[in-house]
Amino acid sequence: MGKRDFDLNTLLDVPLWETVQDQIAQLTGTAIITIDFKGNPITKHSCRTEFCSVIRENPVFRKRCYRCDALAGLEAVRLERPYIYLCHCGIVDVAVPVMVGDRYLGAVMFGQVRLANSDTDAKVERLVNEISSFQCEGDSTRHDLLDMYEKLPEMEYSRIVQIADLALHVVISFLDF
């Protein structure tokens, strides 16, 4: 296999990985998707929240989601560990880098959670300056979106770190060849 053929689409058994991804999402209570190095989805979303489903229906917001995913994956590579951050909607996401040797192929993204209110020690940085304001065409649409935001699962920062460690070990084990 040449270097040009060396990407997630050729290395990953996508149906098998989606099964693993679905199980991890169910067990952890997070949403998960795998992206390539450009931020494009390689897999379907596992357990995507209603809030994020609606956000990604909007072409402007969807582009911001892809941008957040791509930038977070690169930051995870730079840090050489999972990167925990706030997306453009202000919710917690995590990028777990997928590396083969020193080559960055993409990332496993998980999250779509809010930090638990009591977790004031968490140091989670905002990834982008473009903040989505949820200014929708009608007040009822905006109200529905805010309700969906409030229904996002809350999670302690320490739990997010534990899931990030688990995801990293699963990725390393899955691609160990």
Image (tube, grey):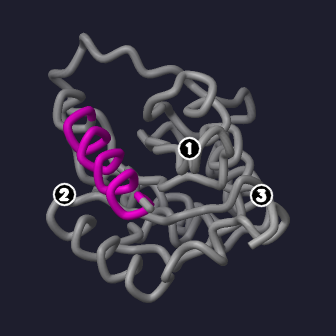
Are the residues tagged 3 and 1 within 8 Å (C-beta)?
no
The answer to whether 156 appears left or right of 7 in the picture is: left
Q: Residue at 65% x, 43% y: name it.
A: 133
Residue 103 sits in quarter = top right
Which of 67/57 is in front?
67
Point out the image quarter for the N terminus: bottom right
**Disc 3 and disc 1: Cα gap in Å?**
12 Å
| Residue 25 x, y percent position in the rendering | 27, 66
Q: Residue at 48% x, 53% y: name it.
A: 109
On whether residue 167 falls in the magenta region, the answer is yes
Residue at which label 3 appears: 63
The answer to whether 13 appears left or right of 130 in the picture is: left
Tell which tag, 3 or 1, sits nearer the viewer: 3
- The dot on residue 89 is 1
The disc labelled 1 sits on which kind of residue? Answer: Cys
Which of 170/18 is in front?
170
Say what secondary structure mark 1 lies in: loop
Q: Residues within 10 Å of mark 1 (few under 14, many from 20)?
A: many
**Disc 3 and disc 2: Cα gap in Å?**
27 Å
Say what secondary structure mark 3 lies in: helix
* 80 over 42 or under it: above or below: above
Say what secondary structure mark 2 lies in: helix
| Residue 169 x, y percent position in the rendering | 29, 47
The disc labelled 2 sits on which kind of residue? Answer: Thr
Q: Residue furthest bottom?
A: 15
* 177 over 95 or under it: above or below: below
Which of 116/25 is in front?
25
- The dot on residue 28 is 2
Q: Main secondary structure of the magenta part?
A: helix
**Disc 2 and disc 1: Cα gap in Å?**
21 Å
